[in-house]
Image: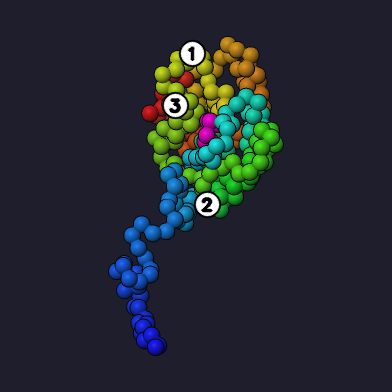
């Protein structure tokens, strides 16, 4: 006995997109789950050269901390080699599982190429130093345009003093500055930096790995709101 074949009906586009429990198509909650901390893959907006950027690079889960003294020489070298005519890393801070950068880029493609080139160079050299293999960075980098002097000042304070943000209960000396950041070469401190330890002297005497700022916002604009102090604590 032959089974009667079921007649198939072509669904309209609108109907195909509505879940009815019987047909395929879109369903609530279907598809790959977005991981916490990921950045949208939407097209990045255009940027203008006069606006610096605050870039955050996060490490993959399971990658050991890269904020270690024996790695900082390698990381600083990668930062120095990352500069291009249309891309510069002006300030930085290396934390256990992420990096903060203040950058200048001529346009969004220059920013993308500059950051991705830095990621590739850093991963290769850090892997070699740590005797490991595989990717280091997770997901896409996050970039936020800094359009006003206030935004610049807040971003600089957050980046350069970020370790105080994460270790709020730790007591820091009045002359302490972050050895994993570009604080030693920052020209916006309210008072000159002093060396009370050999590592501080070494950093202050070292050739700067970060580029000098060229935009008005980073060179002049934010300073009109007041220079930064070492005892500031970023919110």
Residue 141 seen in this snapshot: yes
What residue is pinned by disc 2? 108
- Residue count near mark 3 (Cα–Cα under 10 Å), binned few <14, some 14–19, many ≥20: few
| Residue drawn at (44%, 47%) of the image | 35
How far apart marks 3 and 1 lie (CA) works out to 16 Å
Mark 3 falls on what kind of element? helix
Number of numbered discs visible in the structure rendering: 3
- Extreme residue toward the front, this view: 1
What residue is pinned by disc 1? 173
| Residue drawn at (62%, 20%) of the image | 204
Q: Nearer the viewer, mark 3 or mark 1?
A: 3
| Residue drawn at (45%, 15%) of the image | 171
**In the picture shown, does residue 15 fall above or below 205?**
below
Q: Position of residue 94 (x, y in %)?
A: 55, 31
- Extreme residue toward the bottom, this view: 1
Mark 3 and mark 2 lie on one chain; the one further toward the N terminus is 2
Q: Is residue 95 magenta?
A: yes
Q: Which mark is residue 154?
A: none
How far apart marks 2 and 1 lie (CA) works out to 40 Å
| Residue drawn at (51%, 47%) of the image | 139
What residue is pinned by disc 3? 166
Which residue range is magenta in the image? 94-99
* Quadrant placement of the N terminus: bottom left
Q: Is residue 61 magenta?
A: no
Residue 216 seen in this snapshot: no
Mark 3 and mark 1 lie on one chain; the one further toward the N terminus is 3
How far apart marks 3 and 2 lie (CA) works out to 30 Å
Q: Quadrant of residue 153?
A: top left
- Residue count near mark 2 (Cα–Cα under 10 Å), binned few <14, some 14–19, many ≥20: some
Q: Position of residue 46 (x, y in %)?
A: 48, 54
Q: Nearer the viewer, mark 2 or mark 1?
A: 1
- Horizontal side of 204 relative to 163 (left or right) equals right
């Amino acid at each position: 006995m032959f089974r009667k074949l079921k007649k198939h009906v072509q669904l309209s586009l609108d109907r195909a997109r509505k879940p009815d429990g019987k047909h395929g198509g879109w369903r609530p909650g279907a598809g790959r789950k977005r991981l916490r901390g990921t950045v949208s893959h939407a097209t990045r907006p255009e940027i203008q050269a006069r606006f610096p950027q605050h870039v955050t690079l996060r490490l993959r889960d399971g990658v050991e901390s890269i904020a270690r003294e024996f790695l900082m020489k390698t990381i600083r070298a990668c930062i120095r080699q990352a500069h291009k005519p249309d891309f510069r890393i002006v300030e930085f801070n290396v934390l256990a599982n992420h990096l903060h950068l203040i950058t200048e880029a001529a346009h969004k493609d220059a920013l993308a190429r500059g950051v991705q080139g830095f990621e590739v160079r850093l991963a290769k050299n850090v892997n070699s130093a740590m005797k490991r293999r595989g990717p280091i960075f997770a997901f896409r980098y996050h970039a936020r345009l800094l359009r006003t002097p206030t935004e610049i000042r807040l971003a600089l304070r957050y980046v350069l003093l970020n370790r105080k943000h994460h270790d709020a209960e730790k007591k820091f000396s009045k002359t302490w500055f972050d050895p994993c950041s570009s604080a030693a070469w920052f020209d916006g401190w309210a008072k000159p930096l002093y060396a009370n330890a050999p590592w501080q002297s070494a950093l202050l005497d070292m050739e700067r790995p970060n580029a000098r700022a060229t935009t008005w916002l980073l060179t002049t604009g934010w300073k009109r709101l007041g220079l930064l102090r070492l005892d500031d604590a970023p919110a």
